[in-house]
């Protein structure tokens, strides 16, 4: 018996990268040209599930694709995907379904896995661009003389910007096979950058997946993870229901190109190799305290909630509940049941109480897993202000830790709120609170609008610093400020000292009586000091334009002679290196080296990618320094 899923987006099981790459490899040139349209058509195709765990997708009158995931719930071998059409397995239907499915997480090579990635055919080389060199990579990538060579250590796609690289000599140099695999992956990443996210289709994504599989077999775990992250974010950028997060695509490409650039230059830093992260069991029971609930809306029609918890040692933990259903399910999941083996509660109660977990299994990102042997029970909570004050920075592989600060409301600012950070009673910089999610099914925007209508109010804010703008905070929860004598929130006792901005609705009785409505921003003394937006935004805009529109878009400043004066604004703001990099990136993008026969030179794409990378590394490092000065000073 097959049951159709209620959501319209395909809720398909994850597929191993090498399976997708092999399926695209098997298509003819004509079918590869139709692949993107076939993938797009699946957005309106219902997905059915059978009682035996198989998935069924009707792709035509006589074409039905059946997916049979293994015990892990992932499609790991080609024979787990079948189509009833006559061309199967080299058919468009089967390949489109595999290309539309989520990309499986990186993991160690399976036992008996082949020692090489899918072979490259001449047919595919024509469709996806020039083949990468199979010889040793050059010792360094060519960069413009005006920009620093890319040389920073690994950074999270959403976390702090990278610091100066550590060129450790304690590890062995990468092997010749690893250097070749890194060069192959660099070429695939550079092709994505040159084309631009809007022009990268399923065939080019499959090329990145093929190169990622090669890196996996070579033991380059960090490079593989970076490549899969790029593919996921490029796919999300094509999803009309996904929020536009160009900055995250920039960070993902920066990580991929930076790691592969250094590996193909045989950099011996062992951090470049990385490792497969496995869940671990703490050697003692975990004593956890609920902090907040955060709605989650993911590409592909998935939604849910993450309940954030903090341990006695200040480390962050999470209970995730994300399934098909989009923003509607994210709204409902805030009060849904949560199970941790035999422990059963709901997210709202758990986020405001304590929890003791014995035999805990913790994923690398801090998520608690419901593995055999796990036991949990309720425990007394702690005041919210005490819990958030004791938090520590997130560990390796985790999302950046939320930031906690006390602010005074200044004024409404569109969907956001202008606030002034406070250290005790000492006024600090002006910041902007922006909605963590703008979907109308969630309460973020309405709650911020209500806060903005009460200037002078002081609140404690828990939120995430916007990685693209250090002066913007995406708040997840707010609470009252005690002992200051200034007006603050008066929340219900059952809320335990805080409001989850995605779920709890702030009402008039939560505010001081007689709170005046917000006057026009032009009449507020604080509005003249809006959050600083340094000239670096011009450099960020150019990098994002290059990622979105490709090399032709990045060449626009050079073609127009920078008539907008953005390079001059950077120089006036004290960012002379940034101004040089801005001009150099536009010039390199506009200059297309050609040989004696007028054909594009083979290393031209490498030159452009290296210049973009040098610019991205400079911007990330400079913005990180400015952010540290803002939040720590």
Image: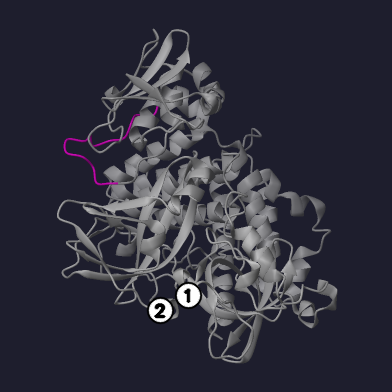
Q: CA distance from mark 2 to mark 1?
A: 7 Å
Query: Residue 552 location, x and y as percent?
Result: 69, 44
Residue 41 position within the rendered picture, expressed as x and y whole percent measured from the top left: 55, 24
Find residue 27 and name its label: none
Q: Is residue 399 shown above or below 388?
A: above
Tell me which residue sits at (31%, 35%) in the image: 117
**Residue 598 location, x and y as percent?**
66, 34
In the rendered image, the quadrant that contains the C terminus is bottom right
Relative to 620, 583 lies left or right: right
Question: Residue at label 1?
Answer: 497
Q: CB atoms at circles 2 and 1 under 8 Å apart? A: yes
Task: Tell me which segment is drawn in magenta.
Answer: 107-121
In this picture, residue 616 sits left or right of residue 296: right
Judged by its main secondary structure, the magenta piece is: loop
Asked whether residue 548 is drawn in magenta, I would say no
Q: Earlier in the sequence, mark 2 or mark 1?
A: 2
């Amino acid at each position: 018996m097959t049951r159709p899923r209620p959501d319209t987006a395909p809720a398909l099981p994850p597929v191993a990268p090498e399976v997708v790459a092999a399926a695209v490899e098997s298509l003819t040139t004509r079918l590869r040209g139709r692949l993107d349209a076939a993938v797009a058509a699946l957005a309106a195709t219902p997905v059915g599930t059978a009682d035996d765990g198989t998935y069924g997708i009707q792709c035509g009158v006589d074409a039905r694709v059946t997916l049979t995931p293994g015990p892990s719930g992932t499609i790991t071998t080609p024979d787990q995907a079948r189509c009833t059409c006559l061309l199967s397995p080299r058919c468009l239907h089967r390949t489109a379904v595999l290309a539309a499915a989520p990309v499986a997480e990186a993991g160690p090579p399976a036992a008996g896995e082949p020692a090489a990635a899918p072979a490259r055919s001449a047919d595919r080389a024509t469709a996806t661009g020039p083949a990468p060199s199979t010889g040793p990579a050059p010792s360094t990538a060519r960069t413009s003389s005006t920009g620093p060579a890319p040389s920073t250590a690994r950074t999270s796609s959403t976390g702090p910007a990278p610091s100066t690289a550590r060129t450790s000599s304690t590890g062995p140099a990468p092997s010749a096979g690893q250097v070749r695999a890194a060069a192959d992956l660099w070429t695939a990443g550079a092709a994505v950058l040159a084309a631009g996210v809007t022009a990268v289709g399923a065939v080019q994504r499959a090329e990145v997946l093929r190169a990622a599989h090669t890196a996996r077999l070579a033991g380059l775990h960090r490079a593989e993870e970076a490549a899969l992250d790029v593919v996921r974010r490029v796919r999300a950028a094509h999803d009309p229901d996904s929020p536009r997060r160009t900055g995250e695509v920039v960070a993902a490409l920066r990580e991929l190109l930076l790691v592969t650039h250094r590996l193909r230059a045989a950099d011996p830093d062992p951090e470049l190799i990385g490792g497969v992260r496995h869940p671990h069991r703490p050697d003692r029971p975990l004593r956890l305290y609920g902090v907040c609930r955060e709605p989650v809306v993911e590409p592909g029609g998935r939604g849910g909630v993450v309940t954030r918890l903090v341990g006695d040692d200040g480390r962050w933990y999470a209970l995730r509940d994300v399934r098909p259903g989009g923003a509607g399910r994210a709204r409902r999941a805030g009060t849904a049941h949560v199970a941790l083996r035999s422990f059963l509660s709901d997210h709202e109660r758990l986020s405001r109480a304590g929890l003791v977990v014995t035999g805990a299994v913790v994923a690398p990102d801090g998520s608690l897993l419901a593995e055999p042997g796990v036991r949990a029970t309720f425990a007394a909570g702690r005041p919210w202000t005490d819990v958030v004050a004791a938090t520590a920075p997130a560990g390796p592989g985790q999302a950046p830790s939320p930031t906690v600060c006390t602010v005074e409301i200044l004024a409404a600012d569109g969907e956001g709120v202008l606030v002034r950070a406070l250290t005790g009673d000492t006024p600090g910089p002006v910041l902007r609170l922006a909605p963590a999610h703008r979907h109308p099914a969630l309460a973020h925007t309405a709650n911020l609008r209500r806060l903005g209508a009460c200037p002078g109010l002081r609140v404690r804010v828990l939120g995430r610093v916007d990685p693209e703008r250090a002066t913007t905070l995406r708040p997840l929860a707010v609470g009252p400020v005690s002992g200051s004598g200034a007006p603050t929130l008066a929340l219900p006792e059952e809320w335990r000292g805080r409001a989850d901005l995605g779920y709890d609705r702030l009402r008039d009785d939560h505010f001081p009586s007689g709170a005046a409505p917000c006057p026009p921003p032009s009449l507020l003394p604080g509005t003249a000091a809006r959050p600083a937006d340094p000239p670096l935004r011009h450099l960020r805009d150019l990098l994002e334009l290059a990622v979105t529109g490709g090399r032709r878009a990045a060449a626009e400043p050079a073609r127009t002679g920078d008539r907008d004066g953005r390079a001059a604004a950077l120089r006036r703001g004290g960012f002379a290196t940034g101004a040089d990099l801005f001009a150099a990136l536009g010039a390199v993008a506009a200059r297309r080296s050609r040989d004696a026969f007028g054909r594009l030179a083979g290393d031209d794409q490498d030159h452009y990618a290296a210049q973009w990378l040098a610019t991205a590394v400079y911007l990330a490092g400079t913005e990180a320094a400015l952010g540290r000065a803002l939040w720590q000073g």
